[in-house]
Image: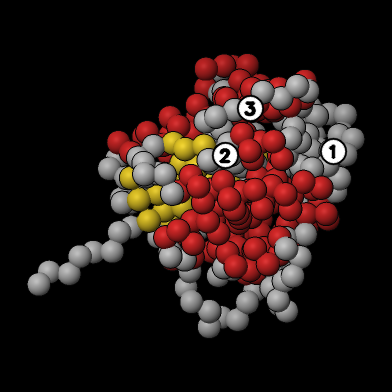
Amino acid sequence: MVSRRAPRRGLVLGAGGVLGSAWMIGALRAYEDATGIDVRTMDMVVGTSAGAVLAALIGTGTGVETMVNSEYGRPLFGDPVLDYTRLGSALPPRPRMRIGSRRLLAASARHPRSVTPLVALVSLLPQGRGTLAAIGELVSAADSTVPTRPAWVKPWIVAMDYDTGTRVVFGSPGAPRASLAEAVMASCAIPSWYAPVMIGGRPYVDGGTRSPASVDVLTDAGLDEALVLAPACSVALDQPRGALARLERQMRRWATRVVMREAELLRSAGTKVTVICPGPADLAVIGANVMDLSRRREVFETSLQTSAAALALPDAADGPLAAAG
């Protein structure tokens, strides 16, 4: 009797701020409950910005149950705590009065078709002052556990070279050398909010400036299945009244188009792709500011329900889904 090969699975965790992180933890819990699959056993994990933090924790052996305990404020002794209060307030500090990246601005002017409008914009934004030391310390602490732990998957962490606008996938073959903590901080460095992270003498910023999730980096990975959690996207949008919320929903439309186009590339490579993103019920609690910590618990608990409902749909593995609700 010929034994069947276990399917090769991938996990993509996208950008979405501190509320996107809470939403993804709820979705991960719903996925594990629905499938019985421990996400730490995934063959490949890709993380961008907020998703980079979770990808790093998964890669260092931190289970979803530990993340859930942190959301409820009851971590076990020795568990990493996702304390986003150390990142500052829900609004960015006053930026420096200097252009974000003169080199990227010059490259954008010389070759305007080589960069997206968003990449060109972030070259003009003033440099941020915020620090991501707390994120680096969290990842370093998780990465320094006892050496006898199981060999979990090494995550790929997405950032952008702030001089060239090039997407860099730390951890992938041929990528610049960086510690896991450095790569995650670079991936989280929102332009004009946080200072660029220097690695090997080069500045890096948030990978979400190139793509909300970078699903397409897995096209040649030979995966059978992939789960994509994209908190910056929404297939079904609500109709908020506030101007800031309406602008945020416009950004979601752009992000959704990018992620769905990348997901189709992965499907064309023979991978069954499930994309889950926030639906109207999630957006109602997320609001207009994805960095608003006061909403984190409610976003997490809403995602537990909406993501479970989305995964229970009959066509959950056939196309993009808004989290049900």
Q: Is residue 282 left or right of residue 229?
A: right
Which amino acid, mark 2?
A: Gly
Q: Nearer the viewer, residue 40 or 30?
A: 30
**Mark 2 or 3: the one toward you:** 2
Q: Position of residue 94 (x, y in %)?
A: 90, 35
Which amino acid, mark 1?
A: Leu
Cα distance, mark 2 to mark 3? 11 Å
Sequence-first tag of 1 and 3: 1
Colour mapping used in the image: secondary structure
Please say if 145 is above or below 215: below
| Mark 1 surroundings: few (<14), some (14-19) or many (≥20) residues within 10 A | few
Q: Is residue 204 left or right of residue 34?
A: right
Q: Position of residue 58 (x, y in %)?
A: 55, 63
| Residue behind mark 2 | 325
Q: Secondary structure at mark 1?
A: loop
Q: Position of residue 154 (x, y in %)?
A: 49, 62
**Mark 2 or 1: the one toward you:** 2
Q: Secondary structure at mark 2?
A: loop
Quarter placement of the N terminus: bottom left
| Residue behind mark 3 | 238
| Mark 2 surroundings: few (<14), some (14-19) or many (≥20) residues within 10 A | some
Q: Quadrant of residue 28?
A: bottom right
Residue depicted at 69% across the width and 73% down the height: 79
| Residue behind mark 1 | 91
Quarter placement of the C terminus: top right
Which amino acid, mark 3?
A: Asp
Whether residue 166 is visible: no
Q: Quadrant of residue 260?
A: top left
